[in-house]
Amino acid sequence: MGAKLRSAAVSSEGAAIAALAPLPSRAGADSAARASWAAGHHVAAFGDPGSGRTVFAERLLRAWPGRVHRITGSPALREIQFAALAALTAHAPDAGTRSPTQLIAALAAAGDSGERAVLLDDADYIDDASAAALAQAALSGSLRLLILGTSAERLPASLRAAALEIDHVRLEAITLDDARVIAEAALGTALALHDVDRLRHLAGSNARYLRALVLDARDSDGFREVYGYTALREGWVPNGRRVGELISLRLSIQPAPVREAVLLLALTGEVPVPLAERLATPESVRLAVSAGLAELVGGPVPGRARTPGSIRVCGGLTSPTVLARVPEPELRTHAEHALRHTEEMTAATAITVAIHASQVGVTLDATRREAIAGEALRSRQFDAALLLTDPVHGGELSDELCLLRSRALFESGLHDDAHEILAPMLAAGDLEARVWSAKMSAAFGLTDALDATLAPRPTDEHPAPEVLAAWRDVLLTKAGGIVPASALRAHADSAALGSEVRAAALQSALLLDVFAGQAGAAAGEAIALMSSPEWEIVPLTEQGDLVVTLFQALLATGSVTGDLAGWDDDGWAALRIMPTLYLFADGRRSIEAGNAKAAADLLHQALAANGTENRFGIGANLAAATAAASAMLGDVESATELRDAALQLLAAGGALHDETERLLLPAQLLSDGPAAATAHWHRLRDRAHRTEQRYLLMRVLHDGWRLGLHEDLAALSATAAQVQGPLAAALAQYANAAGGDGIALERAVSGHLATGHLLFAAELTTFAIHASRQDGRRLPVSPAMHRSLAALAELRGVNTPIMKRVRIDRETLTEREFQVCAAAVSGSSNSEIADLLFLSTRTVEGHLQRAFGKLGVDTRGQLAPARL
């Protein structure tokens, strides 16, 4: 995706931008352009304004030994013949008295004094006469041309013809990796990835605007520090001067009809072409496209019914950045005009227009307001829903708007206000208000409150009692209470209930199945539902919960890399799942694989994105997972801090409560020692037994063995035999593998490797080797065991008690011994360590042997990095 920075014509900002690190996605384009230029060819680079064309050219010319003449095209001078050529030769004596013919001759003669290049920036706006002269000079060999523009089609005719023979590269929109480089270079610190992505979208994947947005946010105190990451503050909007001025300048050179069309498209977002032409005019829309400020999307497809396609702003322009500096009276006029067409708009477009209209005091009728606010909630646009349900923008609220506002308040963290606004409806016994109030209570484990809210009333009429009973069971389960899965399935199958409670009941039943050991069946059922026509009628909130349940099921089976029913990125994006959950899912997968460093990075970012959110215990679960990753790396301070945070949040309960406590075991062991961890483990084991959560019991038994808290592998294997999935199949072999059964060991290790559980495979292999040595047995090392031991090289920094690795310790070793061991742990050979520390190889070997003796190990493979 394209990276657009600043023209070198503005030297102060150009120098700052040129200092940015090369963008990852531009490596191929950089290499191709350098090769062409080195071979003596002319080069053209095309991309939108701000795509980094000028920086790209400066890198290319960095090693150029000759002289470089720079010309920047200007729309104001486009119609003045020879304007650009005159600027190029203005340094020559008597330049102002020369005729066009003399200017062309001087340009051609300039080539005789050595290698010269002309950098044509914004070449779209070079006047025709100068373009013809430069093209002729280039063809004659007098000059080398480096052309920068938006596209070959928009160049003056003579340059366009020359460009057919010129090597060119396309600078596409910037990727997420590019955006991270730009943002972190501007801030000088690590930025949470979900915020990088948000800024990239706000900037229209335009590098210049992205950098401006980052600096605007910095100057307006738009960032906060969370768990070592910089993150955007909640509620931050792009209203700084930099990006506003950049876009205002860009629009100021356009005719009034083009500016009007761009502003209307910024108000609406992407809309069908016919609607855009009714909002503006066909001619202004066409001109906006020709100017590169709007683009057509879709359109006629061979073999299908003819469709007109849609249109949207482009070139780095986005609704928030375009509208940030529009005067309020002008914005109100355009908003009132657009609102007349809301019946023709999609829900997303209507929301966008309604938001902008409400912000400048334009009101909607009550019916349309309810419909649009409801769509805003379903698409998780909570700020929009709050704006559209604000009494200030429409007087007294209907019951429907009160409910919508309560939900938006709750989602925005204003829990007391969310309850307060429902008080009149609750007093009147309104069914929807009671269900929603109970949901809010359940989110924080307030089961007594939800019971009271859902209690039957004499005034309840059919089917209210059945609906309330179903919601009570569902919400008790979500809050961590115990409800039989059979009761939840009965609700899910009841035709008398609505789609929301039925979907919620099914999701809760499937999650219970996962922890009961039936994750394979639960995953299959979830995927079948998500692939069926019925999925479309499942409310968005329950769709998100079902996706989380599917992830838990895949995690439980060990099949976290499996294909999810062929869903593509657009399918997942349509669910509008919170960034926290994406990061959390990747972090949990990394923990399962043993890649604690990646897990800690992802999960810390998820914590930054999550903020103080802890509904249904999600914050506690996230903190516990991050604590586990930190403990695997020996980071005592982080593991302890996060363990304490998770313990404080556990009171909210939630269906993941027991899983959260399981995840806390490694941090408990690292922070409080074996006695406290063992007591915690016994509580978890006994609870899993009592509640018949066989999957959870299997994981507790496995974790306890890995952490050195028990040695009962028979119990682990017996439990795993009752659980579905490849992870359980591997764990079922542990008892026999530990007893010296080579076939069982091979099956278990191979099973772990096949599902990506590298750490589990390495742990079992090292345990088996150590046990065989203690028993005086000779254990043949199979190919699978070799692969598992090799995998340890990919898990640097990770340690668990069963591996019997020892962390190097400054207090035990001399400084030189510590340095040698640290280099050995990082993967360096003895000769590489010798070169690094300016020692002989023999001296390095001596330091290692003395360190091994002090630490009680035999080989470097038993070493682990120092604790953080």
Image (cartoon, grey):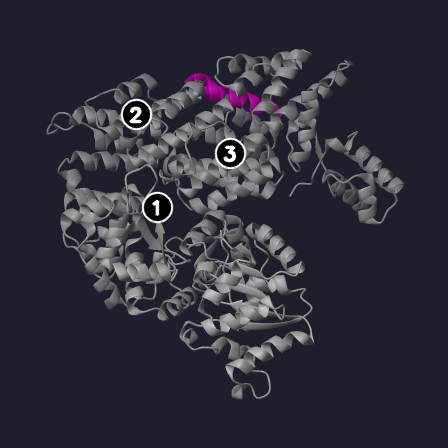
Sequence-first disc among 1 and 2: 1
Closer-to-camera residue (598/516): 598
Residue 420, visible in the rendered structure: no
Q: Is residue 416 left or right of residue 698?
A: left
Q: Which residues are magenta?
A: 687-708
Q: Is residue 370 above or below residue 151?
A: above
Position in image of residue 139 (x %, y %): 59, 66
Sequence-first disc among 1 and 3: 1
Closer-to-camera residue (30/809): 30
Tell me which corner region of the image, top left, top right, bottom left or bottom right, holds residue 454. top left
- Amino acid type, label 2: Ala
Number of the label disc, if any, that sits on residue 588: 3
- Amino acid type, label 3: Arg
Position in image of residue 359 (x %, y %): 26, 59
Mark 2, other Cα within 10 Å: few <14 / some 14–19 / many ≥20: many
Spatial separation of the CA atoms under disc 1 and disc 2? 40 Å
Mark 3, other Cα within 10 Å: few <14 / some 14–19 / many ≥20: many
- The answer to whether residue 693 is magenta is yes
Residue at 59 percent across and 84 percent down: it is: 92
Residue 186, visible in the rendered structure: yes
**Dot 2: element:** helix
Q: Is residue 263 left or right of residue 466?
A: right
Counting the numbered discs, the total is: 3
Tell me which corner region of the image, top left, top right, bottom left or bottom right, holds residue 267. bottom left
Number of the label disc, if any, that sits on residue 505: 2
Sequence-first disc among 2 and 3: 2
Residue at 18 percent across and 46 percent down: it is: 370
State the residue position of label 1: 298
Spatial separation of the CA atoms under disc 2 and disc 3? 25 Å
Question: Viewer-nearest of labels 1 and 3?
Answer: 1
